[in-house]
Image (spheres, rainbow, N blue to C red):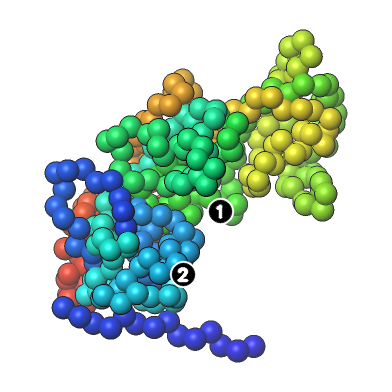
Amino acid sequence: MPRKPEPERAPHVPAPQRRPRHQPAASGRPTEEMRVAKALARAGLCSRREAERWIEEGRVRVNGKTIKSPALDVSPSDRIEVDGKPLPDAEPIRLWRYHKPRGLVTTHRDPEGRPTVFEKLPPEMPRVVSIGRLDLNTEGLLLLTNDGALARHLELPATGWLRRYRVRAYGKVEQAALDKLKNGIEIEGVRYGPVEATVDRVQGHNVWVTLALREGKNREVRKILNHLGLDVNRLIRVSYGPFQLLDLAPGAVETVRRRVIADQLGPAVARELGLTDRENDADARRARAKKPKDEA
């Protein structure tokens, strides 16, 4: 099996984001040595996957040169630009709970011109990415963050966090049929993992069901219940891991305290993301990045 080529290093020479007006101009430089896509994600511009796509589209320059491959390591001595603008300085990692209303798509740009989640956020919000997505007609809890690395970690099925939904559907279903979902189910060649499902109550011709799953494949809840003969007419995500919707009003956004995030991620992950460092603000991270390696 051929060996993967070593990543290039950017030659040494002396993206759009809404930023609070009081902050200093962006330096365009990462805080430490890392892959260029990770630097974009750490700056809160996008996820790593989106960064790789931006690079392929020719939107990213390093030291004045447009790059075409994400296989590039950059350091604090390199200057990065996205769409002609300096890379924003890394901000303290933040997480928000957002109550997504129905009728919004979870994307920054919709080719069909439909209203998006990000267009409806309060104007004082910085540039954020969503952790996973909720489709047009799904409402409820959507987590938002300004850190692409955190988003990527929380989206991974390996994280094992339970996503819980309340569903109203037209039709009838027996609890015995729902109990069989605990072993997973295959629908049209797609294998879905274990699902916990309970009938809550019957309301006329509709039934209310609570479902909990860990994978969150595209339209998974709707497909599973449709396979059981139910037609979903309302779908609400009420929790994502330890974070809950509770009484958050539709369209409202609420910050999650950093200590809570760190506690829920665990010491190792929190340390890797910089959440347990009290000096994890923009100034301290830049200072650590400028420190000579022999002093570190």
Q: Which mark is residue 115?
A: none
What residue is at 43 percent from the left and 26 percent from the top?
251
Q: Mark 2 belongs to which amino acid?
A: Glu
Q: Quadrant of the C terminus?
A: bottom left
Residue situated furthest front in the rendering: 112
Q: Name the spot of residue 241 as percent of width and height, x first.
A: 53, 39
- 260 with respect to 88 (left or right): right
What residue is at 48 percent from the left and 54 percent from the top?
152
Say what secondary structure mark 2 lies in: helix
- 109 with respect to 289 (left or right): right
The mark lying in front, picked from 2 and 1, is: 2
Q: How many marks?
A: 2
Image quadrant assignment for residue 81: bottom left
Q: Would you place residue 10 above or below residue 81 in this image?
A: below
Q: Mark 1 belongs to which amino acid?
A: Leu
In this orientation, does residue 78 appear? yes
Say what secondary structure mark 1 lies in: loop
Residue situated furthest bottom in the rendering: 2
Q: Quadrant of the N terminus?
A: bottom right
Residue bearing the label numbered 1: 156
Q: Name the spot of residue 172 as percent of width and height, x first.
A: 83, 21
Residue bearing the label numbered 2: 56
Q: Residues within 10 Å of mark 2 (few under 14, many from 20)?
A: some
**Which residue is more in the foreground, 88 or 272?**
88
What residue is at 28 percent from the left and 68 percent from the top?
80
**Which residue is more in the foreground, 292 or 123?**
123
How far is disc 2 from disc 1 in space, using C-alphas?
24 Å
Q: Residues within 10 Å of mark 1 (few under 14, many from 20)?
A: some
**Which residue is more in the foreground, 270 or 68?**
68
